Amino acid sequence: LVVEANTRLGSTPPSCHNKCNQCHPCMAVQMPTVPNHNRIQPSTAASVAHAKPLYYFESSPGSSSAGNRYSNYKPLGWKCRCDGHFYNP
C-alpha cells in the first residue's frame, strides 16, 4: 500500500471556535498584515551601535526597477471574521 504525502504551500487556517465573542458564524479569513515599523525600540544607545545594517541585493543587475521590486509585497495572516469584525485567532 502506497501512501502519498500531500504537500501544501502556505499555512492552514486556525480554529475560530469561540474566538468571535459569541458571534456566529466565525470564519477564518486571510488578510494582509499591517507592518509595524516601530516594533523594535532599542533600549540604549549601545544597542544601536551593535545593530547590523540591512542590505538588499538585486538578483538581476540590469533591472530597471531596483528600488521598487518588492514594494507591493503584502504578507498574509489569518484572522477570524464575523459580521464585518475581525478577531485574533
Image (cartoon, rainbow, N blue to C red):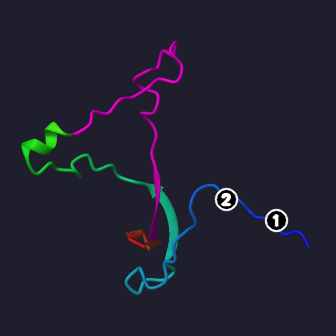
Secondary structure type for disc 1 = loop
Q: Quadrant of the N terminus?
A: bottom right
Give the Cα separation between the discs numbered 2 and 1: 13 Å
Figure check: 47 above or below 71: below
72 relative position to 38: left or right: right
Q: x%, y% of residue 87?
A: 38, 72
Q: x%, y% of residue 11?
A: 56, 61
Residue at 27% over, 33% down: 53
Is 53 contained in the magenta span? Answer: yes
In front of the other: 88 or 42: 42
Say which residue label 2 marks. Answer: 8
In front of the other: 64 or 2: 2
62 relative position to 51: left or right: right
Q: Quadrant of the C terminus?
A: bottom left
Figure check: 24 above or below 60: below
Give the residues in magenta.
51-80
Q: Residue 7 lies in what quarter of the image?
A: bottom right
Q: Residue 20 lies in what quarter of the image?
A: bottom left
Q: Label 2 sits on what residue type?
A: Arg
Say which residue label 1 marks. Answer: 4
